[in-house]
Image (cartoon, rainbow, N blue to C red):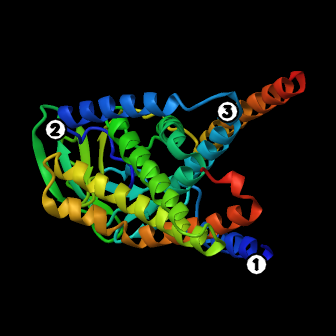
Amino acid sequence: MAKTTAAVILLLFFFLLYSDSVYAHRMIIETPETGVIRVFYDGEIPAVRAAVQIWDSEDNMVLEGPVDNKGQFTYDEKLNVHKVVALDDFGHREVLIIGEVKREINRFQGALTGVSILLMIALIFHRLNKKNSKKV
Amino acid sequence: MAHIPEGILTGNIAAAGYVLTSVLSLISAKKINCSNVPKVSLVTAAVFCASLIHFPIMGTSVHFSFVGLAGMLLGPLAFLSVSVAVLFQFLFFQHGGLSSLGINIFNMGTAALIGWLVFSVRHRFNNTRKAAAAFSFLAGFVSMLVLASLLSLALYFTNFPKEVAIMAFTAHIPLIFLEGIVTGFVGIGLYKLGKEYLYG
């Protein structure tokens, strides 16, 4: 028993170390500076297989191309950029409207909230069951 | 990626996902009662957090699902548990999207039910520790295999090129084995701890 438990803990510890952050795998587009687009997955993993499309305010695609090995795509700063779309070979798709502020949820807070809700439900019903079993 | 992102599914597939998920969730919910809510909640919390353990593979990233484990622990209730977990992942981690929520729940919930069915086959053999270990591994392995296949099929039927569907499946192959191994170890641990923790 102790051996199995130790093996499970070691295995999970290895995976958690290897995963290098607590973030998951959503695709994200960033514009660190004018003329540069960065595409990556949560955990700062560059989306090296992504392709970027640039759309103007009249919804015409004005530029398209793959990102480099850092997940970056550069374009002419004079270009009228309204929308950036990133797609990869695995079905990920992300859209960024320039100037639009996206509401980001802190992952750690999100995980804490979700787990707290579920633990609370578990605790409430556990107590309820205990009460009911005492009555019987 | 076990979650299909927002804005890529066609309307009919998204609608079919919601219909199938609603039906299976209702069937699964019939099995719930006050006494099993704590167990369902704890397993849901584990599945909810599983997607935080991710790996960069082949230029993308994939993550654990633990749906096979949910099936082993909850049986038919696993679908309901996974539904809540995937809903929470959408709300708190922005995994997937509103239009793809139905199909994401269906894919992962079905994989969990398959995990339960595979694990229940152990009763046909001597219910020994070795059988529990082997069928725990198979439950994790097959459920992840089903999940990756359903994901690829959904992409294929959404008019993505065949290559995209194949790539999405291929990226999950290492994880299919890893999930089988981890589920196998957890299965042995739970079997030793007490058979009553496992369903059926």
Q: Name the amino acid type tagged 2.
A: Asp
Label 3 residue SS: helix
Q: Position of residue B154 (x, y in %)?
A: 24, 48
Distance CA(mark 2)–CA(mark 1): 61 Å
B185 to B149, vertically: above or below: below
Label 2 residue SS: loop
Q: Position of residue B167 (x, y in %)?
A: 25, 66
Q: How many marks?
A: 3
The residue that label 3 is drawn on is: A117
Dot in front, 1 or 3: 1
Marks 1/3 same chain: yes
Distance CA(mark 3)–CA(mark 2): 43 Å
Looking at the rendered image, the quarter that the N terminus of chain A falls into is bottom right
Q: Name the amino acid type tagged 3.
A: Ile
- Residues at circles 2 and 1 in contact by the CB criterion of under 8 Å: no
Q: Which residue is drawn at the image coordinates 18% and 40% (left, top)?
A: A80
The residue that label 1 is drawn on is: A3
Dot in front, 2 or 1: 1
B133 to B66, vertically: above or below: below
The residue that label 2 is drawn on is: A56
Instruction: Report the chain holding disc 3.
Output: A
Q: Earlier in the sequence, mark 1 or mark 3?
A: 1
Q: Which residue is drawn at the image coordinates 39% and 70% (left, top)?
A: B57
Residue A127 in the figure: left or right of residue A52: right
Regarding residue A23, the answer to whether it shows in the image is no
Q: Earlier in the sequence, mark 3 or mark 2?
A: 2
Mark number displayed over residue B41: none
- Residues at circles 3 and 2 in contact by the CB criterion of under 8 Å: no
Dot in front, 3 or 2: 3
Residue B125 in the figure: left or right of residue A66: right
Q: Position of residue B87 (x, y in %)?
A: 48, 35
Label 1 residue SS: helix
